[in-house]
Image (cartoon, rainbow, N blue to C red):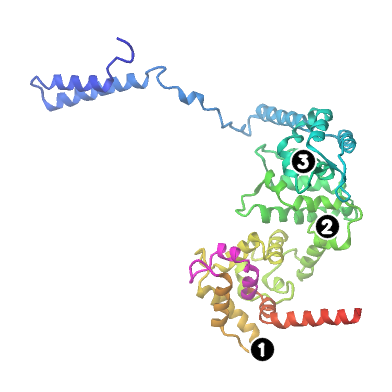
Amino acid sequence: MTKEQEPHWSDILKRRIINSTKGERSEEETRAEETELFTKYYTEWKEGGDRDKSYKDIPRFYYRLPAEDEVLLQKLREESRAVFLQRKSRELLDNEELQNLWFLLDKHQVPPVSGEEAMISYEAYLQVGDKAGPKCKKFFTARVYAKLLHNDPYGRISIMQFFNYVMRKVWLHQTRIGLSLYDVAGQGYLRESDLENYILELIPTLPQLDGLEKSFYSFYVCTAVRKFFFFLDPLRTGKIKIQDILACSFLDDLLELRDEELSKESQESNWFSAPSALRVYGQYLNLDKDHNGMLSKEELSRYGTATLTSVFLDRVFQECLTYDGEMDYKTYLDFVLALENRKEPAALQYIFKLLDMENQGYLNVFSLNYFFRAIQEQIKLHGQEPVSFQDVKDEIFDMVKPKDPYKITLQDLVNSCQGDTVTSILIDLNGFWTYENREVLVANDNDSSNTADLDDT
C-alpha cells in the first residue's frame, strides 16, 4: 500500500470507535478509549516528518538586536555596518568621474540646440553609458531617459537636466550614507541625540554659520533639530526615518548655508540661518523678564503682537511639557513653529489639540464659543463694537465645510485649506481683526499699488 493509499488517522479512529461500541462497554470506557486513540493518532500526525515544511521556505525577516551586555555582538554589528557604508560610498561617483561624465555628454551632444540647451539623442545617450564606466550604468536606462524626455521634436533630452539628475542622485546617496553613520541603532532612523550630533558636526562646514559664537552652538542645534522633529515626528516617538529626512526640503535649506553669497532675504526666510536662529532665541530672552531661563504664562502672553487670548495660553500650559508651570526653550520652539506655520498640517495638529479641550477628536459649537468669548472680551477692552458669535460660527463652518455639519475634525481643517484663518480667528485678536477687515485691507493694498503705478509714470 502506497503512502497515498494509507487510511487517514481520522478514518481509523472512527472505525475503532464503531467496532468498540458493538460490545457491552460503559460510556466512560468508550470516552476514555476515544481520548486515548485521538491523542495517539494526533501525536503521530503532528510528528509526521516531511509532510509540510513550507514554513522553511519563508526567508528570515527578524534579526534580534544585541543586548546592552552583549558587547562583542554590538562591536561586530557596528563594524559590519561601517564596512557596508564604506562599500556603498565607494560605489558613488567622485568628482573626477563626474567631470569625465560631463565631458562625454558634451562630446556626444546632438544638434540643433534647443534654446541654449545642449541636447542628446537616445542612441548617443547609450554610447555615453557604454563609455562612462560601470558606476554610471544605473543612470543610463530607458526609464531615466523617458523620465527626462519632454517636448523635443527630435526625441532628445537636455544634457544639463540629465547631469543635474545624476548629481542629485549622487548627493542623495552621499547624504543618506552620512546620516546613516549617526544611526546608532542601525534601524534606518535618527533619534534626537543622533540628529543633534549630525548638525553639530555639520556647523563648521557651513560658511554662513562662521559668525556664530561657540557658546551659542547648543542653542543653534536645539533650534535646528526642533524643526525636523516638529514636522517629521507628529506622533512624538522621538525618532525620524532617514528616508523622511531626505524626502523633505529641510536638509536642502540647511545645506543652502554652504553658499557664501546667500542673499539677506534668503537668510531671513531660512529657519536654519544664523539671523533666524538668533531672532528666535532673542525673542525668547526678551520674553524672559525674570531671567530664570524659563517662560511663565504671563511672560509668554507678550509673544508677537501680545494679542493671543488668555484662554488659549491656559491650554498651552495645560497640554505642553512644562517645569513647575513654566516653559523651557525646546517647548517654546514647538510653540513658535506652530504659530509661524499655521497652514502646515503639523502646525494645525498642534493647535487643534489645544482647541479640542475634551479630546473628542472634533470641535463643536461649544468649543468654538468657548475660545471666541475670549476674543469678544478683548474686543470690549479695546472699545470696539461686539461681534456676534453666531455670525462667526456660521462663517467658520462655511469656510471649513466639514463632513459632519455639527463637528469640525482636524482632517476637515486640513482639507479646507482654511485652517490658518480659522485658528487665527479663535486664538488671536490680531488674527481675528485681520480677517474681519480683510476687504478694507485688500482695498488699501490696491490703492497703494495704483499710487505706485502713477508715481512710476
- Residue neighbourhood size for the residue with mark 2, other residues' Cα within 10 Å, grouped as few (<14), some (14–19), many (≥20): many
Residue at 17%, 22% (x, y): give it: 17
Mark 1 vs mark 3: in front: 3
N-terminal of the pair, mark 1 or mark 2, is 2
Cα distance in 3D space between marks 1 and 2:
41 Å
| Residue in the image at 56% along x and 74% along y | 398
Q: Marks 3 and 2: which is nearer the front? A: 3
Q: What type is the residue that disc 1 sits on?
A: Gln
Q: Distance of mark 1 from mark 3, alpha carbons?
A: 58 Å
Q: How crowded is mark 1: few (under 14 residues within 10 Å), some or many (20 or more)?
A: few
Visible residue check, residue 249: yes
Seen at 75% across and 38% down, the residue is 177
Residue 233, compared with residue 407, is above or below; it is above
Instruction: Please state which of residues 181 and 423 is positioned toward the viewer in this rendering.
Output: 423
Q: Is residue 277 above or below residue 132?
A: below
Q: Which region of the structure is painted magenta?
A: 401-426
Secondary structure at numbered mark 3: helix
Residue 273 badge = 2
Q: What element carries label 2?
A: loop
Q: Is residue 208 left or right of residue 153?
A: right
Q: For residue 293: magenta?
A: no
Which residue, given by chain and number where applicable, does mark 1 sit on?
A: 384
Q: Which of the two labelled residues, at mark 3 and mark 2, occupies the earlier sequence position?
A: 3
- Distance from disc 3 to disc 2, alpha carbons, whole Å, reads 25 Å
Q: Does the magenta stretch include residue 420?
A: yes
Question: Residue 256, image x and y in percent?
Answer: 83, 52
**What type is the residue that disc 2 sits on?**
Ser
Q: Quadrant of the C terminus?
A: bottom right
Mark 3 residue type:
Lys
